[in-house]
Amino acid sequence: MLVPRINFTLLAPELILTVAGTWALLTSVATRRKKPRSLLDPMYVAAAGCVVAFVSAAQTYASIPVGYHGTLVSGSLAVDGLSLFLKMLCILGTLAGVILTRAYHRRMYNEGELYSLLVFAALAMCLLVSATELVTIYLSLEFLSLVSYVMAGYLKEEPRSNEAAVKYFLYGAVSAGIMLYGMSILYGLTGSTLLSEIAAQTSGGAAGGKAVLLAVAMVATGFLFKIAAVPFHQWSPDIYEGAPTPVAAFLSVAPKMAGFGVLLRVFALLFPTHAPDWVTLMAWLSALSMTVGNLSAIPQRNIKRMLAYSSIAQAGYVMMGVAVAGPATAATGMPAVMVYLGMYLVMNIGAFAVAIAVERLAGSEEIPDYAGLGQRSPWLAWMMVVFLVSLAGLPLTAGFVGKYYLFAAVLRFHELAWLAGVAAANTAISVYYYFNVVRVMFFAPAKQTTPVPQPFGLRLALVVAFIFTLLLGIFPDHLLNLASTSNHVYGGPLPTQSSVAPPPPSSR
Amino acid sequence: MFVPRENRATIKWVSLAFSAIPLALCIPLIRGFLGPHAAMPFAERRSWIGALGANFFLGVDGLSLPLVVLTALLSLISLVYSWHIEERTKEYFALFLVLETGMLGTFLALDFFLFYVFWEVSLVPMYFIIGVWGGPRREYAAIKFFLYTLVGSVAMLLAIIYLRLNSGTFDMLQLAVRRPLEGQWPQIGLVFWAFFLAFAIKVPLFPFHTWLPDAHVEAPTAGSVILAAILLKMGCYGFLRVILPILPSAAAAYSGYIAVLAVISIVYGALVAMAQWDVKKLIAYSSVNHMGYVMLAIAAACAAREGDLTSRAAALNGAQFEMIAHGVLTGALFMLVGVIYDRAHTRDLGSFGGLMVRMPVYAGLFSLAAFGSLGLPGLAGFVAEFLVLVGSFPIYTLITALAGIGIVVTAAFMLWTIQRLFLGPLNQKWAELKDIDRRELISLVPVLALAVLMGVYPKPILEVMNVASMAIARLFV
């Protein structure tokens, strides 16, 4: 039997992550009873692995021509703009998770293995965003889920953490089952597991019809579970609350980005014929996600639960972009989704980093214990203001540019203008609870005023997130151009320049 | 702000110096406008976000110049007035400068993206100024102010994006020339209502005014001054800069609604003000009344009715003049209320009386500002209201006649206020009150002097405004 020829340079990020994850696992076993040092410290191994993998993905991205797309491993993994762009984001999210875990004030049993799990999660996400074949999609999604279940339950002596892991597992198992069932129907209808093959089979309307729609909706269940969109969102507040905060920070960004990646890919490849049904479905789920997420976030007292509901709402905003990322309109929706995910990464990691810092400071996750933070540690409080303003989508921050892109993408289509209206109303709702935190931080008197020094890693993560939240809000050109030249997927429609933002007229 | 937080005096002087810069920069602008007029004599354009087509495009014309000068002047004066703030001084002065940046930027921006950014930038500092340094119900007032304005501005964002998608530009001057949505119903109607919501909440026009009394009453004195004198003008400015030039046919079609809401604001604002016993609340509602005149004039200028160029231009001149006059006079009134509240710690009209004896200078200044506000000839308010009524009467005869009720009621409550504060027997509780001090005089005298000057010799300001007014009025005849 012939071994398929594989271009290993294109697989470099995945290979690097495999090596780093294994290495981190081995070092954590070797140094279990000792205080780890430098090269043997799993945290440094994991962080270095992420950095090298990121650089390699970026290099691959820079070396391939715009519009390039190819496949690896018998067509089951794609190398294209979408996958490379999201790989970079997922790896960055993992790196943030690694740094924040070290900065977390609670020491966990077998902490070293947590770093290796994070790296393996990054590997799973890299595979997921490039998967172009049903079995690969299923395997990488399950890989990611299994790693996540373990991480959610990492505070072993904490009942809430155990509960989180079990809940996550049960919800995850059910949605994976539904997804697998949908996949088997698709295979039965078309006789292939390759997305491009399925698309070719169903585009003529020969096979399936409504059955294809149903099957793909079932497959999408698995993705919607990962991105915590309504109605598959109930797990996330409990899991974020119970899991160690750095793990919650990681879960709130990276797996969501991977979930959106695979959702975009499936959407962009399938359904030339069923596009209207799909657009309607996505638009409704988007409107529901943001409304349910924002309304449920209002009464929350625990910052992690509040951020969980907020991230459900954020997923709703991103789905506006997914709704207009179908085959005919990919040039509009896809860059908007990618830009927003990039913005979301920095601002949400920033908000969680503040939550970790306040946990060290006040020993609490309750919002009322943020009282007087504006006087106790003004820098921390003002950074939190910037992250929250950004999450709310107000100007001069990353979130505004992201939201602008999504609004512009949706307003292009008159029949979806209502969705932009819903999102605008939701922006106002979200300000209420985001600024509730600001209110507590600045308007309530401080209980204590002793500043608490924060570890270097945490300060680094905070400052980097802070700088990028502002930088991407004020000078977003670079990211916008990157996203608009990356909106091509293997087997999809030919890449076109983003039409959200036509080049400005050169003369006055 | 790299000054240590303990060093309060340095913080204050540095802020003062920074806010003096824009005022100093206004001088060449004013000189430029006294000569022959170009369409946009001062403009500056730099590319900003290429991928979005947003430019850093600022400019001054007859419409924005008076407001820019007003903003620079009142910001400086508010900082002087805030000299006594000793609690979290650094944050207060830093936020005030950010606020000034946002306000100036809104009036200067000629790129829609930039306009929106500055519009929102002015929002967050005011939220903090009300919420941290405000009165007893400050938290409620701060979030109410924020949410109300935000609902309007997200609607405006959608409208801006929609205009952009239909024209390919953010350039407000280009949009005013091309008017991309003209004749496209119902899209132009939706865009109109989105802008209307944003600006009407900011003005505020009845029934969107409910945030105003809360915000004005709870804000610290300087915050109330800025709110009344400048932030409300951002709404009126939006009508004049965006709705009338870019969406003229929608403005004409819906001008009747605006006029009706305006006259309700005038009469209702005046009547509610008369019922108030809290002086600050009274002045807050009188702002609703005065903004009603501005909106009435704007509605008259764009009305789809018979109306010659002269009356429309007169109405627009009146609207612009009222904006400045109200800014100056109400700013002064809020500072005067702050003076008495700092001393007596109450604003209840019923508890005062006979203060003329104890505080003669204060009484004189307060009466001057109040007379200006009720429209006494010789002061700025009269010129403004006269022009508004003269311009609007030929176009909306009945509605303008109804607005006359508002003038009578305004006169009544202003006179009653003066009577209750200064005349009658002196309440012995306040026998120890000191007259106005130097800091307060420095802030008040320039503003009131300007009010007198504008009332006696309005010609140069009106000439500057008239260029813009004629340009807009021509669209509707």
Image (tube, coloured by chain):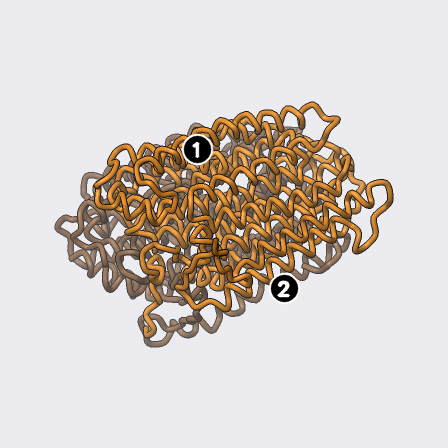
Image quadrant in which the C terminus of chain A is located = bottom left
Q: Which mark is residue A67?
A: none
Look at the image and give the colour of chain A: orange
Q: Which residue has dot 2 on it?
A: B17
The kind of residue tagged 1 is: Leu
Residue at x 42%, y 71% (from the top left corner): B45
Gap in angstroms between the C-alphas marked 1 and 2: 68 Å
Between A484 and A209, the one lying in front of the other is A209
Residue at x 34%, y 73% (from the top left corner): A506
Could you classify mark 2 by the number of other residues whose Cα lies within 10 Å: few (under 14), some (14-19), or many (20 or more)?
Answer: few
The kind of residue tagged 2 is: Ala
Placement of B427 over or under A47, stated as above or below = above
Image position, residue A56 (x, y; %): 58, 62
Image position, residue A379 (x, y; %): 69, 49
Q: Residue furthest left?
A: B306
Image position, residue B347 (x, y; %): 57, 33
Task: Answer left or right for B400 relative to A7.
Answer: left
Could you classify mark 1 by the number of other residues whose Cα lies within 10 Å: few (under 14), some (14-19), or many (20 or more)?
Answer: many
Residue A246 at least partly seen:
yes
